[in-house]
Amino acid sequence: MRRRLGWRAAGLVLAASALLFVYFRFDPSRYFFPKCPLYWLAGLHCPGCGTQRALHALLNGRWAEAAGHNLLAAAYTPVVLFGGLERLRAEVTGQPRRASFLYRPWFGWLTAALVIVFAVLRNLPGPLGHWLAP
């Protein structure tokens, strides 16, 4: 069973690496990446709008540009990286991931509240909405 987990972890790392390479190499604003359906239909910025461009900027070392595309995605990048490393550690060792702060109820509620507040603020008229919009 441990050998199967090792192959599974290797497959996850390979898939994530391939996806990151695509986002590193190709700028989503100029290539084949999907556009936000909420913005296309309603003209509203969802909490994820600009995340693909932010990921491209982060992978190319342009932190300020990434924050300009999606501040929440740029701010949560360390959390996502930590979660990925926790997942990899759990796959390799067979230990549960539940000990991490990522699985605490307060962290889930905090993340949900931040996403909702961010979505509302980035659609407000005025300087704050303009600053948070992608």
Image: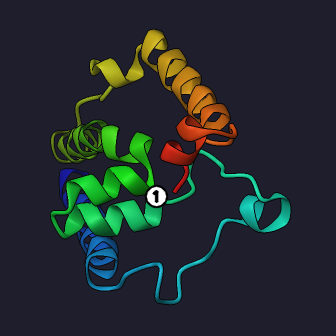
Left or right position of 112 against 2: right
The residue at the point 25 percent across, 53 percent down is 64
User: Is residue 41 something one can see in this rendering?
Assistant: yes
Looking at the image, residue 81 lies above or below residue 7: above
Residue at image x 32%, y 38%?
75
**Residue lying farthest bottom?**
31
Q: Residue at x 34, y 62 (%)?
A: 55
For label 1, the residue is 51
Is any atom of residue 98 visible in this view?
no
Quick check: 54 left or right of 51?
left
- Using the rendered view, name the quadrant where residue 66 is placed: bottom left
| Residue located farthest toward the front when viewing the structure as drawn | 126
> Which residue of the protein is positioned furthest toward the right in this rendering?
41
Q: Residue at x 33, y 81 (%)?
A: 22
Expressed as whole percent of the image width and height from the top left, the position of residue 49 reads 57, 56
Image colouring: rainbow
Where residue 59 sits: x, y (%)?
A: 22, 66
Q: Residues within 10 Å of mark 1 (few under 14, many from 20)?
A: many
Residue 56 placed where, x, y %?
A: 32, 69
The image shows residue 23, relative to residue 110, as above or below, that is below
Instruction: Classify residue 129 by image quadrant.
Output: top right
Residue 24: quadrant of the picture: bottom left
Q: Nearer the viewer, residue 127 or 83?
A: 127
Does 110 appear above or below 94? above
User: Looking at this view, is 2 or 22 the one in front?
Assistant: 22
From the top left corner, tell me how far across and down residue 2 is, in percent: 19, 50
Left or right: 124 with respect to 12? right
Under tag 1, what secondary structure?
A: helix
In this orientation, which residue lies closer to the viewer: 128 or 55?
A: 128
Kind of residue at badge 1: Thr
